[in-house]
Image (cartoon, coloured by chain):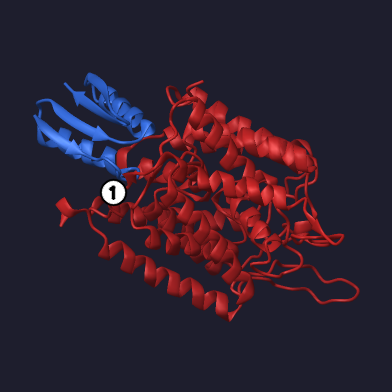
Chain colours: A red, B blue
Amino acid sequence: MNFTDSKKKLLLAGAICGIIAAVLAKLGNPANMAFCIACFLRDTAGALKLHTTETVQYVRPETIGIVLGAFGIAVATKEYRSSAGSSPMIRFLLGMMIMIGSLVFLGCPLRMVLRMSAGDLNAWVALIGFAAGVGTGAFFLKRGFSLSRAYETNKISGTVAPALMLGIFILSFVTVGGVALLATSKTGPGSMHAPIIASLIGGILFGVVAQKSRMCFAGGIRDMILVRSFDLISVIAGLFVVMLIYNVATGNFHIGFTGQPIAHAQHLWNILGMYVVGFAAVLAGGCPLRQLVLAGQGSQDAAVTVLGMFAGAAAAHNFGLAASAAAAATADAPAVAGGPGTAGKAAVIICIVLLFVIAVCNKRKTAK
Amino acid sequence: MKEVDARGLSCPEPLMMTAEALKETKGPVKVLVSEPHQKTNVEKFAKTHGRKTVTTAKGSEFEIVIE
């Protein structure tokens, strides 16, 4: 099915992904983190012990499913194309920055939309930063920003990313001397998950639909600005509406800044965190979800961006860059305002400076 | 014929370069792209601007002539 030839079909594509997210939330994924690429890559990085924050370690079959689903549908519809060579190390840095920005806000653009649909006003505030970041990226694209050409590579090379993802999935079942090889959280968000098979199937379906619809959260706003195209934003709108209906119907819709699950109300840092994500995603040619899909369909440059996101997740947790969630006071502990610490704030500022350097220094040859 | 070589470039560069070329000339424009989704995007863009396209596969890449 070709989703891209009409807005109705694009809305439908978004709605299907919304239903997948809603079902996975119902089956056990954390509240309003039903489907978050940044959080799930971070959890997977934790399972691989790239970081050791005990509450966020779990091989998320959803992200693995997205890559495998995108790979399968791309091969089946002859859209698989093995390519590489478009400034891979800059893309690695962009991947790191996308993850650091996401973990300061506590969510990727996909989770931002899910949080918005659950009434989390912090996510609406963060949208301002995200849109501004995308706008800044679009400004540099207009000025001729480019990470230069990718070239076709040996077909097998493009299968490495899907194969690695499959390998991680298989390793998640391996035990050595009765001890699981990979880490799994016993408490916290990492311990909350839908059954493995449901997560994997959900991820594969999500990957298939995202590949066919070209779903991209950064691209939605970028294309509105650059080419007055409302195609990609239609997909996001479909997803938002389905999740809004689900949240209202199940009593999960709570409008406000406080009491939101795994969120904080440090507005400036929500804005700046998502500014980094929007800016970096436009320079990288797509949001975290799109990078996974592109990695699945053979782009090794996108695969390097995904590796950058893994490294970013490790850095964010190993060096305390990730924000903490706000928490109400309990009998044992006082209330916590949450938000990023000093290191996280410094990291966001460094990321913004670095993004401007990258944006200024990379121009298409003809645009010089 | 004006030619746009957008092979191997990331989105949305092929589309932006096509838009620029269509602004510069009223005549036909030949666009070269690598990825199937970029081919679709360029065809759609031309269609919404009232132009016809003829696409031919060139190995693993595509040549779109906007008439």
Please give left or right for residue B50 compared with residue A310 in the image. Answer: left
The chain to which mark 1 is attached is A
Q: Nearer the viewer, residue A167 or A339?
A: A167
Question: In the image as oriented, which residue stretches furthest toward the bottom?
Answer: A342
- In the displayed structure, B37 sits above or below A313; it is above
Q: Position of residue A168 (x, y in %)?
A: 66, 52
- In the displayed structure, A310 sits above or below A345; it is above
Please give left or right for residue A177 compared with residue A11 in the image. Answer: right
Residue type at mark 1 is Arg
Q: Quadrant of residue A281?
A: bottom left
Q: Residue at x 24, y 40 (%)?
A: B6
Q: Nearer the viewer, residue A238 or B2?
A: B2
Q: Which residue is mark 1?
A: A149
Instruction: Examine the rendering and report whether any part of residue A117 can be seen.
Output: no
In the rendered view of the protein, which quadrant contains the C terminus of chain B? top left
Please give left or right for residue A271 compared with residue A222 in the image. Answer: right
In the rendered view of the protein, which quadrant contains the N terminus of chain B? top left
Q: Secondary structure at mark 1?
A: loop
- In the displayed structure, B67 sits above or below A14; it is above
Instruction: Examine the rendering and report whether any part of residue A135 can be seen.
Output: yes
- In the displayed structure, A263 sits above or below B11; it is below
Q: Residue at x 63, y 50 (%)?
A: A36
Q: Nearer the viewer, residue B14 or A277?
A: B14
Q: How many marks?
A: 1
Q: Residue at x 91, y 73 (%)?
A: A331
Q: Quadrant of residue A38?
A: bottom right
Q: Position of residue B24 (x, y in %)?
A: 11, 36
Tell me if mark 1 has few (under 14), some (14-19) or many (20+) residues whose alpha carbon lies within 10 angstroms of its own.
some
Q: Position of residue A352 (x, y in %)?
A: 41, 69
Q: Position of residue A52 (x, y in %)?
A: 71, 70
Q: Nearer the viewer, residue A78 or A226?
A: A78
